[in-house]
């Protein structure tokens, strides 16, 4: 069946990034197609409340290679930043490999941070991502996804950066139209 677009709704909870804050949460809603998505999010992280917009545009370059341009804007009280990521993606049978760079712009601190990353996926269910700016930011993230039904996905993530680490669990509902 050909699908024009999907409605997306997700709820997640995660351990706090900074103790003794309560458990963080995130609620998202949006639409997506095979080549782009737009998502509005609301979350509590590190004791602050955020509102954000996530927009992606995916373009196929050649056979198994794709490039992604991503705009991410997150606002909380006096914190504003955006992130742009581009990567090449190579799919070989059940495996997917992404190599890319990200630029994070912090409008309050007037800083730009470039990071490089490598992401490995197996059948969309298992993933590992390593990201670093080779100076003061190094992160490792691993996840497992379980497809509960045709429309519901359950994802559990573990992420560690510097001395901080946290767990996140997320339920995603996608309705295809």
Image (spheres, rainbow, N blue to C red):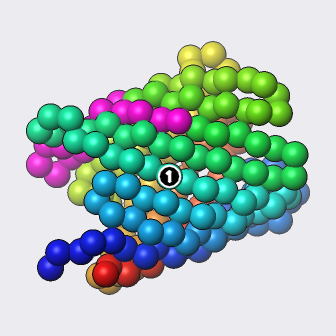
Q: Which residue is mark 1?
A: 55
Q: Place residue 115 in its image quadrant.
A: top right
For residue 62, side relative to residue 44 (left or right): left
Residue drawn at the location 67% of the way across and 31% of the way down:
105
Q: Quadrant of the C terminus?
A: bottom left
Residue drawn at the location 46% of the way across and 27% of the way down:
101
Q: Is residue 86 above or below residue 173?
A: above
Q: Nearer the viewer, residue 139 or 11?
A: 11
Q: In the rendered image, is residue 90 in sight? A: no
Residue sticking out furthest to the top: 135
Start and end of the magenta stretch?
Answer: 84-99
Q: Secondary structure beneath disc 1?
A: strand
Q: Position of residue 35 (x, y in %)?
A: 31, 54
For residue 162, side relative to residue 65 (left or right): right
Residue drawn at the location 44% of the way across and 49% of the way down:
56
Q: In the rendered image, is residue 29 in sight? A: yes
Q: Position of residue 89 (x, y in %)?
A: 27, 38
């Amino acid at each position: 069946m050909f699908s024009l677009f999907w409605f997306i709704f997700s709820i997640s909870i995660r351990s706090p990034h900074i103790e003794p804050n309560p458990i963080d949460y995130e609620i998202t809603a949006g639409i997506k197609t095979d080549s782009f998505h737009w998502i509005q999010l609301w979350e509590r992280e590190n004791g602050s409340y955020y509102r954000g917009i996530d927009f992606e545009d995916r373009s196929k370059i050649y056979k198994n290679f794709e490039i992604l341009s991503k705009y991410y804007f997150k606002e909380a009280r006096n914190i504003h930043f955006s992130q742009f990521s581009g990567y090449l993606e190579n799919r070989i049978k059940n495996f997917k490999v992404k190599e890319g760079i990200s630029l994070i712009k912090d409008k309050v601190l007037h800083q730009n941070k470039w990071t490089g990353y490598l992401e490995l996926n197996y059948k969309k269910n298992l993933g590992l991502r390593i990201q670093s700016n080779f100076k003061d930011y190094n992160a490792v993230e691993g996840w497992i996804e379980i497809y509960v039904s045709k429309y519901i996905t359950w994802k559990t993530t573990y992420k560690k950066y510097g001395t901080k680490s946290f767990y996140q669990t997320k339920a995603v509902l996608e309705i295809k139209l």
